[in-house]
Amino acid sequence: MQLAARKTRPGAPTGSRRGLPFKINRRKLTETLTAYTFLAPYLFVLIVFTLIAIVTALTLSFFYVDFGFTEPIFYGFRNYLNIWYDLTHDGDFAVGLRNCVEYTIGVVTLQTILALFLALLLNQKVRGRGFFRTIFYLPAMTSSVAISLIFYWLYQPQGGINYVLSLLHIQGPAWLENPSTALPAIMLLNIWTTAPTFMLMYLAALQDIPSTLYEAARVDGANSWQMLWKITIPLLRPTTFAVVALGSIGAFQMFDQAFVMEGASGAPLRSTLTAAMVIYDTAFQKSLMGLACAQAFVLFVIIFTVTLLQKRYIDVNIQY
């Protein structure tokens, strides 16, 4: 008795493979698992020290927490009402936020301009570019506390800056003792230490701009100033957004320079008091962790909102 051979279509699944809905690409699966393996340490840090920390802070902001000495008591929105009262009655947190806004506007504006200027300078084909890049970047590699202590000495009435001014027959001020000069003095310190990092970001972006754009502009008769405003700066918008956003985030959270140079009180006359210093004082000096978490979350919302506005108005795609 003969059995009729069953016809199958070429390439049709046979045997044990008939039930598989898709074909497993072993190479792609291996690459994906390898990528997640390398990302695992970063994802762990991100989840534990960022996402969980944000959720925990938001949760504690609705409780009265006496830094572990008593059981947390549900407070509802009372911590946020206390912050609102502080903001409307010129309390420490209101002064700290106001100083942060002034500090952020001054620092971010000047450090962005300085970083772009240094990047344009080092992007030229001149001798010793590598040496100057290293020299300009040295302040960014130095400890913030060490730099703050050095500038603390330089800003003293008999310090280095006033000594140089005296050689020019100029009477230098008491930089850190005058409310009108204390915060600007810390601004100059921060600009000097952060501009080199953003300079490297601008320098990398400048080297990615196609040279053919400048060659075509020269053929059309454009000068260097016109190429800067019509080609370079528009194409640097994504980098400018990154520089401004990162600078703003760091400036709003400024703590160490003011703390080292003026102490936790924000002397003189709260002129150097920042939001981060108020949060530190609330949490570790007054032991009001719930209120400190509420203050931290308010600061987070402000920074997040400012970043979104910067994203909308600065990071605009430019195509040629």
Image: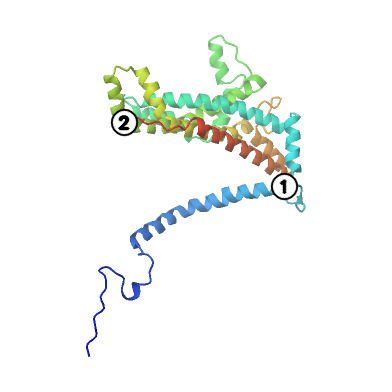
**Residue 80 percent across, percent down from the top left:** 72, 40
**Label 2, residues with CA under 10 Å away: few <14, some 14-19, many ≥20:** few
What residue is disc 2 on?
210
Q: What type is the residue that disc 1 sits on?
A: Phe
Q: Nearer the viewer, residue 190 or 224?
A: 224
What residue is disc 1 on?
62
Q: Place residue 261 in its image quadrant.
A: top right
Closer to the chain start, of discs 2 and 1, is: 1
Q: Nearer the viewer, residue 23 or 47?
A: 23
The answer, for residue 91, to whether it is visible in the render is no
**Residue 3 percent across, percent down from the top left:** 24, 85
Q: Is residue 239 above or below residue 1?
A: above
**Residue 284 percent across, percent down from the top left:** 70, 42
Quarter of the picture holding the C terminus = top left
**Label 1, residues with CA under 10 Å away: few <14, some 14-19, many ≥20:** many
Q: Residue at x 41, y 54 (%)?
A: 35
Label drawn at residue 132:
none
**Residue 237 percent across, percent down from the top left:** 44, 30
Quarter of the picture holding the N terminus = bottom left
Residue ranking furthest to the top = 169
Residue ranking furthest to the left = 2
**SS of the residue under disc 2:** loop
Q: Could you tell me if the residues under marks 2 and 1 are in contact, i.e. CB atoms within 8 Å? A: no
In the image: residue 207, left or right of residue 192: left
Q: What type is the residue that disc 2 sits on?
A: Pro
The answer, for residue 105, to whether it is visible in the render is yes
Q: Nearer the viewer, residue 254 or 165?
A: 254
